[in-house]
Image (spheres, rainbow, N blue to C red):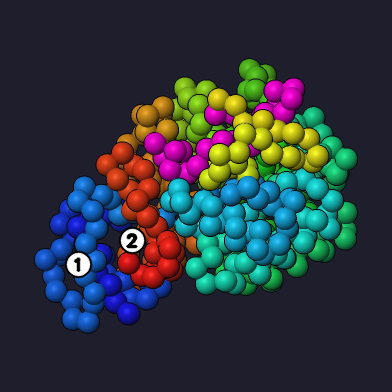
Amino acid sequence: MRHLLTGARLFTGDMLLDDHALLLNGPDILDIVPAVATVAGATRVTLPEGSLLAPGFIDTQVNGGGGVLFNDTPTAAGALAIAAAHRRFGTTALLPTVITDDLNTMMAAAEAAAEAAAVPGGGVIGVHMEGPFISPGRRGVHNENHIRRPNGVDLDRLSALPRHFGDLGRVLLTLAPEQVEDADIARLVRAGLILAGGHSAASLERTQAALRAGLRGFTHLFNAMPPIGNRAPGIALAAMAAKDAWCGLIVDGVHVHPDLLTLALAAKPRGKMMLVTDAMPPTGTDATSFTLYGNRIHRRDGRLVTDDGVLAGADIDMAQAVRNTMRLLGVDLEEALRMASLYPARFLGLDGRLGQLAAGFQADLVLLDANLHVLGTWVTGQRDGGGPV
């Protein structure tokens, strides 16, 4: 079934277009045509005046949403519930994220995500395993009892994971470079995993060696990393200086000072910074607290904190992140939208299918009002609430 979406301004991932319409053919984008065009066999759908139709947001770090924590509910239903909660905020594709736990739980979560990724229109495009091979000294709220170095069995099990997803999704693993040997990094990359550095106190030199071995990006830049020192710049500077590596940014005005993020954006080539939420179960709810590892996490003043004030994820959604990127960092609309869609698609190697409005791409879309609040989404051509329109 063909549908012609008209009446909204279009952002293709490359440019803004006025007076054009988007032609969908089932789950895919067929073409962009002039708004006055008549397409035989297509149902015309008029979108609200002043709205903006853009590629759906892609979030590579989502711990929870809609009251669900992936660590506590490592099932396909849990992953799909998290994706459904974030869809309200423009995220049409995400990696449900399981943080440091016993490896059986983490592997169960990964296999559940593979099952969820096979559900058409579910919005799950892989899994993010954040740990357990991280620095004990930079663990944040991660459970120290499960932090360790990988052994041969771990490497065998992890190396087999991408086959569970096939072409449907990606396996992202966050690790501390000082916890994993270069040969093991190279082995995991050859197996098809995407590796990111994070929760790490690695030196500049150790991080650069890990990059040469295949490290592709960095998880929530500056968070759970030592400050940049004049004689020991460490992993954070290595991330900024690595021209080919991507960095995830939490732009909530809490995790990192906006001026530091502005400096990081200036240091990196355009296209290598992407937005993440690091969201937790309260997203999409009015909950004031939740439980992590049996401990109460409080939702206060835009923060998620333990009793001791340690940050435990972020209280933000992707549409907020886009607005904050413009307001706090001075980034223009087009680039902020790319940071939420095109750039994470490139990081994941899915930019031939997601992150743009172009013929042959999957019809994952977000409709925004003039203030960049979400009016609706489409995943594989199906509008939220069911149906194509």
Q: Earlier in the sequence, mark 1 or mark 2?
A: 1
Q: In the picture provided, is 278 more to the left or to the right than 355?
A: right
Q: Position of residue 356 (x, y in %)?
A: 37, 59
Q: Position of residue 327 (x, y in %)?
A: 37, 29
Q: In the picture provided, is 114 more to the left or to the right than 372?
A: right
Residue type indicated by callout 2: Leu
From where the camera sits, is residue 235 visible? no
CB atoms of marks 1 and 2 within 8 Å = no
Question: Which span of residues is magenta-colored?
Answer: 302-323
Residue assigned mark 2: 357
Quadrant for the N terminus in the image: bottom left
Verify whether residue 303 appears in magenta.
yes
Q: Position of residue 325 (x, y in %)?
A: 42, 34
Which type of secondary structure does the marked residue at label 2 adopt? loop
Residue assigned mark 1: 33
Q: Quadrant of residue 56?
A: bottom left
Residue extending farthest bottom: 41
- Residue located at (52% from left, 51% from top): 86
Q: In the picture provided, is 178 more to the left or to the right than 343?
A: right
Q: Position of residue 354 (x, y in %)?
A: 44, 61
Which type of secondary structure does the marked residue at label 1 adopt? strand
Note whether 297 is above or below 75 in the view shown.
above
Residue type indicated by callout 1: Val
Can you tell which mark lies on residue 343? none
Residue 63 vs residue 265, the one in the foreground: 63
Q: Quadrant of residue 96?
A: bottom right
